Each structure stands twice: as structure tokens, then as C-alpha cells.
Image: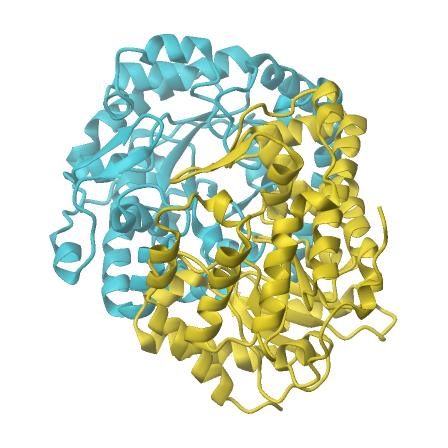
Chain colours: A cyan, B yellow
Amino acid sequence: MTEPALAGARRVLAESPFLAAARGERPSHIPVWFMRQAGRSLPEYRELRKDTPMLDACFEPELLAEITMQPVRRHGVDAAILFSDIVVPLKAAGVEIDIVAGTGPVVASPIRSVADVRALPPLLEGQVDAVAAGVKLLVSRLGQTPLIGFAGAPFTLASYLIEGGPSKHHERTKALMHSEPRVWHELMDRLSDVALTFLRAQLAAGVDAVQLFDSWAGALSERDYREYVMPHSAKVFEGIADARVPRIHFGVGTSELLPSMREAGADVVGVDWRVPLDVAVSRLAAACPAGKYRPIVQGNLDPAVLLASWDGVEREVRRIIAEGRSAAGHVFNLGHGVLPETDPDVLTRIVELVHSEPVR
Amino acid sequence: MTEPALAGARRVLAESPFLAAARGERPSHIPVWFMRQAGRSLPEYRELRKDTPMLDACFEPELLAEITMQPVRRHGVDAAILFSDIVVPLKAAGVEIDIVAGTGPVVASPIRSVADVRALPPLLEGQVDAVAAGVKLLVSRLGQTPLIGFAGAPFTLASYLIEGGPSKHHERTKALMHSEPRVWHELMDRLSDVALTFLRAQLAAGVDAVQLFDSWAGALSERDYREYVMPHSAKVFEGIADARVPRIHFGVGTSELLPSMREAGADVVGVDWRVPLDVAVSRLAAACPAGKYRPIVQGNLDPAVLLASWDGVEREVRRIIAEGRSAAGHVFNLGHGVLPETDPDVLTRIVELVHSEPVR
């Protein structure tokens, strides 16, 4: 793999509140973006994507760029997140995988043996040129708004590949992990290369930050996470360190994992709605006794609360802002993705409310 | 409601290792049972239930008693758990609800308004006579093996009723909670009466312990749990205190909730696989500074691990036994229900292994 000079590949966005907060510097206002802000909650998204299957849309530069821009224009969020899907780099590498409406990703031949693992094709940089082209379009159009790159973490990719699709219990994944640790680590090593290649292509094209989504990591105990997952996610984070962009690490149900997810190499730890930000900050700080580390966090608003009355939403937003003040940096966000039935006007009002709060 | 003299309604089982551990006394061996031990992992269960819909089986005394007995005979577990379902008392009360194979409970008319809440029928004691009859059969047949009674907690019942079935995000439930707290509390109060009536009927018929299943409580933050849920589960526990049986409280993903679930009135706290038992014990003890409380715990083995090789299973069983020694009482169990594809021989081997370990 050629190593592009990643540190010099992007815009200078000195005034970005998102980048300031994500680096632990003082932003001009509290920054806010929403996971899945580009997507089904927006009528303009549903209109634009109506004739295009999900995975096709992720490989059309103009379309993915436009979808990525929609929530920036509508809500005035402080960051764009690349419109993509966790399985995009697998599809690009040649894995037979599709996204079935109402189900999620479906893998034609699930990985169940060491032979299956070794048959998994690597991702070559040129295979995600369409995504890189979309990133370049976005960088030229976003003005002063930073663009966050996107990849699924090795464990979440492994679960899709082994289970053959979304899974409630991840039972085959955990069985492989505990039965054949060598095969497990070989698969995870290959998947960390896939995630790394995908992120480096985005970074070379100009993204200003990255988020590694380990959506299902919360299904694991801390012990299993540290033994079977953390080294591989750490390889991904380490492999993009030269880009010197903020690296966000997010999963759901990660109460027990927050310090380990930071230790894997994250600059910003994403927190779901189960752990208040001040508690997350305490736990992150307690796990780093040197005293030099200052926790930077993102998240915490329960996406289901956005379906409540505005009074209920406003109360939660104000609570989260207050609790976020204990962090060295706070990026306001949800604790998981925007639900499709969310009224987009509520998202816009949240942005206005967050921006109206003083930075202390 | 007439108040039967619950304290005198059951057998004396002075030698039961399960009851000893659940009371913080020294058992003759470490007791073990499995959530969903009666069910689809057993061929004799699949055979017995093949012509009977799930909810019908729960109202046939002979059938539910036989299903409850099957894992006791096969595995030699230290407790039977009443074969039932979380929605049984709702069905008994006249709510139009069914269990659809592959989906779960489906409610004909979901509860969405204060009028819906007020139209929810109460459960009358006589409506669960068939369940009580099954309990009486079991008590006469189980010999020295104790029988654990079963009820779904108010929050989990509320989620089914509001969402209309199983839900990934519980979004309507949370929206009601945050938008209309008065309506929410009225519904929860009614549902705590339903759970209480169901448990008192089982206790009057002779069950030796009870477990309150709050399967979905882990979807909530501790703050929301304490404000919107705990008072209602506490009403259920308080309402059966006169029976003087061990009261177990269980949910999944409850890392943040364990002390609150104890505070609701549990004698034994069920722990999923995300929190090791020694950590759970520390957290429970730390939340009770008086020093008089000695944590009693149940659970922790990830049901997905049972699909791994025996080496992997054995390693986990030994770890959990070692970590459970920090508790005043340890009931060996899974961290969630037995998965249908589990090899029942693995369950039998686990029982043998747990029983072979010394009590310290």
C-alpha cells in the first residue's frame, strides 16, 4: 500500500467548533451533529434515493455527496458525516453482500471456517475510488464545515460476515471467538486491514475527522472485548495516526467498555444514552491515572426521546449540555442514530438550542 | 383482593442449595439453574408442544407442569422455573395478545392514549387459576426441588403493550414516558397490579421463590429507570414481601442499573454477561454503605458461549464460579435465556461441573 502524505491532505478549518471540541480546545459554540443525520428522517433524502438501492447510492459520488450535504443545509449542524454503510468496504472488496430493506445487510456465503477466512478478499485502495471521489466533491462544496469519515470496526464487520446478517445474540461470532481463537484473530486482522484501507482512502481524499463505528461491541464483556477485539481496532486507529485528525470511537451498550474503547486509540469517545456524560468522563479519567489525559466525549441523547414532546426533548438537551461541561471537549450528538420516524424539525430546533447555550 | 396467608403456603425445603444460596446461607453445593431451561433446546419439549400454541400451553396445568419438569429430570438442576410467558397475565386479563412464531408477542390494539390506559382490564385472581393449578401439580411432583415463580415486570409489559410487540428501540414507550409522565405512571401502576396479582396467585399455590423479569429495563438510563420504573417494580416486590421467599430481579444490559434493581426490593440480583460477578458484588455493596447488606447474585454465563467448544465453556464456567465467591450467595445461571440451538448435553455437563466445585 502506498502511504499518501495524509497529514497534509486536508483543508485548514481553524474556526470549526467541531474540530476545536474534538481536540479539547475551546470552540466558539458547542458543536452538534447527529449520527444518521443523512438518511430516512429527511423527505429530501427519501426523494433522492427512491430509485437507487442503498449500496448503489454509496458508490455514486454525486449522489453520496448530495445526501451528505442535505442535513448540513437543513439543520446547520457543525459537521457532515460521509453517507456510507458499514458493509461498503466489504462490498467494494468483492464480498457478495447486499442491504435488504427491513432486514439490513445479508451476506451470501457467511464465514464459518478457516478456509472461508482465507478466502476473504482484501480491500484494494482503487476499489473505493468512488467513495474517495465523493469525499473530494464534498470537500470542495462544504465550505467551512468539516467532513467526518466513516468505517465499521473489525468486530462489527466480523459479526455481519459470520452471522450472515444482523444478529440479536451474535452467537456464531462468539462461538468462533471462544472455540477457535486463532481463526478469530486471523479474520479480525484481515478486517482491520479492510477498515484501515477504507479510512486511509477517505483521509487521502480529504476528510477532516473519522468515526469508527463498532455498533455491536456492547454485546461483549470487557474481558472479551480486550482480548478479542481491542488489538484489532487499535491497529486501525494506529494506522491512521499520521493523518493527525480527531478519531472518534462509538458503540451502543458500551457502559463497561468506555475506557477500553479510548485505550484502543480514540481521541473522542462516543457514549450512548445509558451513561451520563459526567459519569463517562469520570470513568475515562479514572482509567488514566497519569492525570495528563483529559476526556473528550460525544453523544448521550436517546434518539427515542426525539419522538417525545418538545418539553421532554429540551429538558434532556439541557441536562446533557450541563453534564458535558465536565469534559475537556463535548461534541453534542445522539446516543445512537436518528430514527427514521423522527421529525426533522426537532433536529433543527436541537441545533438552535445547543448553539444558543454559552460555552464555559 | 383477599390476602392469603402467603408465608405458610409452601413446602419446607431445608436442604435446598438454591434456597440456601438465595438467602445468603451456605448451600451443600453451588446451585445452578438456567433461564429458559424449559423450552426449545429440549427435543422432548418440541415434541410435547408441537400441536399446542405457546400461550395455550401456558394455561394447561398438566402440560405446563410437564414442560417445567423436563429440564429438572434431564439436567438435575437445583430449581424448576415455572413454564410461562411474560404476557400470560395480560392474556388472562383479557388483553387481545398472541405469540407469533418468529416474531414474539403481538398486541391487537396497542396502548397509545390515556383512554387506552384506562381501558386496560385488571387481572382478577381467578383468571390465572389454570397457572395456579399447574403450580400445585408441580409442588406435589417436584420432591425436594424448589419451584421459582415467574412474572414480567411492569416496564417490560408496558413496552409490549405500547409498541404492540417486541421493539428494538422502545421509541413509543420512551416517548410516552417523557411526554406524558402522568399517563405513563397510571399505566405502570396498573401493570404493577397485574404482575402482583399474578405472583400472589403463584405464591398462594406454593412457589418457593419468584423472579421478576424486566427483560428490557437495560434500554433505559439509570435516571429514567429510577424515575419511571423503579417505584412500580418496588410495589410488586413490596406486595409479596409477606411471602418471605427469595425475590430475584433480572434484566439484560443492566450494567448501570444493578444497585437500583436491588433497591427496588430484590434479594437476589440477576446479572447478564457484561458485568463479572465480582464487579457486580462490588457495585451492589458500594451502593449500600451501611455495611449490613451482603450481595447475592445470579447469572453471568453468556448463552452464546454454550455454542462454543467444551473447552471454551468450561473456562467460562470456572471463571464465573471463582468470581461468584465474592458474593454472600451465588446462584449459577446464564446471563440471559438458553438459546434454542443449544445442545442440551452441554447444559447437563455444566450442571455436573458446577456441582463438582467445592463450596467455600
Say whether residue A225 is left or right of residue B250: left
| Residue nearer the viewer, A208 or B180 | B180
Say whether residue B234 is left or right of residue A157: right
| Residue B197 to residue B24: above or below | above
Quadrant location of residue A26?
top right
What residue do we see at 16% from left, 47% from top? A122
| Residue nearer the viewer, B245 or A240 | B245
Furthest-right residue in this view? B290
* Residue B258 x, y percent position in the rendering: 68, 59
| Residue A216 to residue B121: above or below | below
What residue do we see at 18% from left, 43% from top? A123
Q: Is residue A25 visible?
A: no
Quadrant location of residue B184?
top right
| Residue A260 to residue B111: above or below | below
* Residue B279 x, y percent position in the rendering: 63, 69
Say whether residue B239 is left or right of residue A93: right
What residue do we see at 78% from left, 55% from top? B237
* Residue B240 x, y percent position in the rendering: 80, 58
| Residue nearer the viewer, A122 or A174 | A174
* Residue A264 x, y percent position in the rendering: 45, 56
Q: Quadrant of the C terminus of chain A?
A: top right
What residue do we see at 44% from left, 60% from top? B338
Quadrant location of residue B158?
top right
